[in-house]
Image: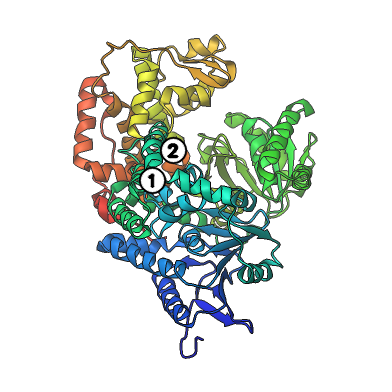
């Protein structure tokens, strides 16, 4: 059938019964990202299939890693630069629609990850079968890049499984397990990995009609009157979670679905134009930039053997216990040490809850729990490849602990501190092997926060830093290497924001107003709620460490609250009263006038400190700084990070605003050294899409 045609990315085979099997195997890559070349070859194949009309077609992946990771984002970035998004979206739609119109049975056989454009490819087939294991993940995650599905996802999925199930999947981008995909009707059958293709052939020979009830539900939920009623409801739910001006893609997706009629061609046209329009927005460009930055962070540990099998953690408090639990979850042998078993047991209990949530099956839960062992005596120190100190923030106590641990070390054992603010040059004093000592600063909650600061000092061996970066990659974290100055990167930038917010709170600005303005800027949580969540005691401890260095003061009233046992969420009372884990925010007087410079007083100190960090070389470059602050603080992702925000708003404009704030509110707002840094002179558009 394919004589004379040569393909780089597809392998075609026709068996004796006339069934054609197409294996996607992108050349030169360990995964299938659907590039223009992959699509062009598929277009040629589908054109030939339409002529030859085989007995059936099976599409699967030849990559062990999975079916497809989605469209090639690097190419999409180039399309956005050249203004050719629309024509490339339409080209993909034409090829997928040609596949959907083949007269023969078509079956997609899925294993592993099937994302974005890969999911749209399987939706263009008549039937789908997936491997029944935990590695199977099917999703349309485009909203996380500031766009929405563009190769027929919005046109086909609601018609396949019904709008009420399809819209939440596309609006969140969350992946489906194999079982969940089967229950929703995204796939028609499950099979073992060994039987996947055999079962797919059976489906080609005996195509089965979708259940009548499922077809009726899908049909009814997409009728014009239903769309006009349901769309406003979904819009309201979406608006309660994100702001349209910050994240326009979910709202555009709902509009595309609402306006799409029964004609697939009309639905595809709406979809393509919507994606092309979204691709031009700063939100999409910033979120795509962040995608590449996250890939850069992940790949820092690539190609390096970390040589770590056994991790020993000293300090079974919230941070130490959760670090230990996470390392065991990711397959490492872990020993957890504290003074008495009564301090270790709560950490083991939290770990068990984490494993039950993440691993589901009793066998996997038990295996993870067995990898985490209590070690009150500290015997694990001598056997470990990596020892992490996670005790309270006191330099003398930490150095005294190191003096007892280091004599037990193997020759190449790494010692790390989880300190959040103490300079590493101060902590390394007295160590026999300071070259194997560094900081591994995790963020709370460990299971949710992706960033780890790998903290340097002047005696650190670069090879040890690389091993630490590789370890972070192995446990699924995003590492960023930072200078070991007070506060490192994230806390140094976050603390001015928190302290200034708490100062305004002490001045009488209502907490809910401060939280509202921060969220209006795009922060995931307001500063008053954040301070209570972190703990006022932690804020005070880090604040006292950093305030002299930053030229700041702790806000009045903080010590009084701590003296009264009001540390925040963990005590049920702090700046807010907490009930059932939620802050009870007081009503604000409707006549209260929000100060016009309130948002600037909160946000610009972060930008000011970020520029100082860049100038001092706390991180290696501006991209890493933006990535660290976004993944470590949740700084409004759609704004691209504090450095990108300064570029887009105008460096001179923000510097002038800081000078005005200094005149009104004090010298703490004066622009710091670094506002003339050449790295800031890069235009916002030129900095938007770095290479992966």
Q: Nearer the viewer, mark 2 or mark 1?
A: 2
Q: Earlier in the sequence, mark 2 or mark 1?
A: 1
Q: Position of residue 326 (x, y in %)?
A: 65, 43
Q: Position of residue 518 (x, y in %)?
A: 36, 28
Disc 1 residue crowd, few under 14, some 14–19, many 20+, Cα 10 Å:
many
Badge 2 marks a residue whose secondary structure is loop
Where on the picture, by quarter, is residue 638? top left
Where on the picture, by quarter, is residue 133? bottom right
Q: Position of residue 519 (x, y in %)?
A: 37, 30
The quadrant of the rendering that contains the C terminus is bottom left
- Which residue has dot 2 on it? 634
- Report the residue at 79% width, 29% height from top: 341
- Report the residue at 33% width, 39% height from top: 246
Disc 2 and disc 1 in contact, CB within 8 angstroms: no
Q: Is residue 320 visible?
A: yes
Indicate whether 438 appears above or below 65: above
- Report the residue at 35% width, 55% height from top: 267
Q: Rounded to the nearest whole Å, what is the CA distance between mark 2 and mark 1?
A: 11 Å
Indicate whether 199 appears above or below 413: below
Q: Is residue 363 left or right of residue 113?
A: right
Q: Is residue 170 left or right of residue 678?
A: right
- Which residue has dot 1 on it? 626
Task: Return the mark for residue 290.
Answer: none
Where on the picture, by quarter, is residue 328? top right
Q: Is residue 641 visible?
A: no
Q: Is residue 240 left or right of residue 673?
A: right
């Amino acid at each position: 059938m394919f004589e004379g045609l040569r393909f780089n990315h597809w392998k075609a085979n026709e068996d004796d019964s006339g069934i054609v099997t197409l294996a996607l195997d992108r050349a030169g890559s360990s995964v299938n990202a659907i590039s223009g070349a992959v699509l062009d070859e598929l277009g040629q194949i589908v054109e030939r299939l339409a002529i030859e009309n085989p007995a059936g077609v099976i599409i699967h992946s030849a990559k062990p890693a999975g079916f497809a990771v989605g469209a090639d984002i690097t190419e999409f970035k180039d399309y956005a630069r050249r203004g050719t998004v629309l024509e490339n979206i339409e080209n993909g739609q034409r090829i997928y629609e040609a596949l959907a119109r083949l007269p023969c049975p078509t079956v997609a056989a899925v294993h592993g990850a099937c994302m974005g454009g890969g999911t749209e490819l399987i939706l263009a087939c008549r039937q789908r079968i997936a491997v029944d294991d935990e590695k199977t993940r099917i999703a349309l995650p485009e909203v996380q890049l500031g766009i929405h599905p563009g190769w027929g996802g919005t046109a086909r999925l609601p018609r396949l499984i019904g709008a009420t199930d399809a819209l939440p999947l596309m609006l969140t981008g969350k992946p489906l397990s194999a079982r969940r995909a089967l229950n929703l009707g995204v796939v028609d059958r499950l099979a073992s990995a060994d039987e996947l293709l055999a079962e797919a052939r059976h489906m080609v020979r005996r195509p089965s009609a979708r259940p009548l009830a499922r077809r009726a539900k899908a049909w009814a939920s997409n009728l014009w009157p239903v769309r006009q009623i349901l769309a406003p409801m979904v819009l309201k739910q979406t608006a309660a979670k994100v702001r349209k001006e910050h994240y326009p893609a979910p709202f555009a997706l709902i509009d595309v679905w609402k306006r799409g009629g029964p004609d697939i061609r009309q639905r595809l046209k709406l979809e393509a134009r919507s994606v092309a329009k979204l691709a031009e927005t700063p939100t999409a460009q910033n979120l795509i930039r962040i995608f590449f930055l996250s890939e850069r962070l992940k790949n820092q540990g690539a190609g390096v053997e970390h040589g770590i099998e056994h991790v020993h953690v000293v300090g079974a408090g919230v941070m130490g216990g959760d670090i230990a639990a996470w390392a065991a979850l990711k397959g490492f042998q872990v020993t957890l040490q504290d003074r008495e078993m009564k301090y270790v047991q709560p950490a083991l209990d939290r770990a068990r809850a984490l494993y039950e949530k993440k691993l589901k099956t009793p066998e996997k839960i038990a295996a993870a729990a067995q990898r985490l062992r209590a070690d009150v005596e500290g015997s694990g120190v001598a056997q470990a490849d990596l020892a992490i100190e996670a005790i309270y923030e006191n330099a003398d106590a930490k150095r005294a602990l190191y003096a007892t641990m280091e004599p037990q070390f193997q020759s190449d054992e790494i010692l790390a501190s989880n300190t959040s603010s103490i300079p590493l040059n101060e902590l390394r004093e007295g160590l026999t092997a300071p070259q194997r000592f560094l900081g591994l600063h995790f963020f709370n909650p460990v299971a949710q926060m992706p960033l780890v600061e790998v903290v340097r000092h002047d005696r650190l061996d670069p090879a040890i830093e690389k091993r630490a970066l590789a370890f972070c990659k192995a446990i699924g974290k995003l590492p960023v290497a930072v200078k070991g100055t007070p506060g490192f990167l994230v806390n140094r930038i976050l603390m001015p924001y928190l302290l200034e917010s708490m100062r305004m709170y002490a001045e009488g600005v209502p907490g809910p107003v401060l939280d509202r303005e921060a969220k209006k800027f795009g922060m995931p949580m307001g500063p008053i709620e954040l301070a209570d969540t972190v703990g006022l005691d932690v804020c005070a401890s880090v604040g006292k460490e950093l305030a002299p260095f930053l030229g700041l003061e702790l806000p009045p009233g903080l010590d009084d609250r701590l003296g009264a046992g009001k540390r925040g969420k963990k005590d049920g009372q702090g700046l807010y009263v907490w009930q059932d884990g939620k802050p009870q925010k007081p009503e604000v007087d409707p006549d209260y006038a929000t100060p016009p410079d309130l948002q600037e007083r909160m946000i610009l100190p972060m930008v000011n400190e970020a520029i100082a960090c860049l100038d001092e070389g706390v991180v290696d470059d501006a991209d890493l700084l933006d990535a660290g602050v976004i993944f470590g603080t949740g700084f409004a992702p759609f704004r691209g990070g504090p450095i990108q925000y300064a570029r887009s708003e105008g460096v001179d404009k923000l510097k002038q605003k800081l000078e005005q704030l200094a005149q009104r509110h004090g010298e703490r707002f004066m622009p710091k050294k670094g506002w003339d840094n050449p790295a800031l002179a890069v235009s916002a558009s030129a900095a938007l899409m770095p290479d992966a």
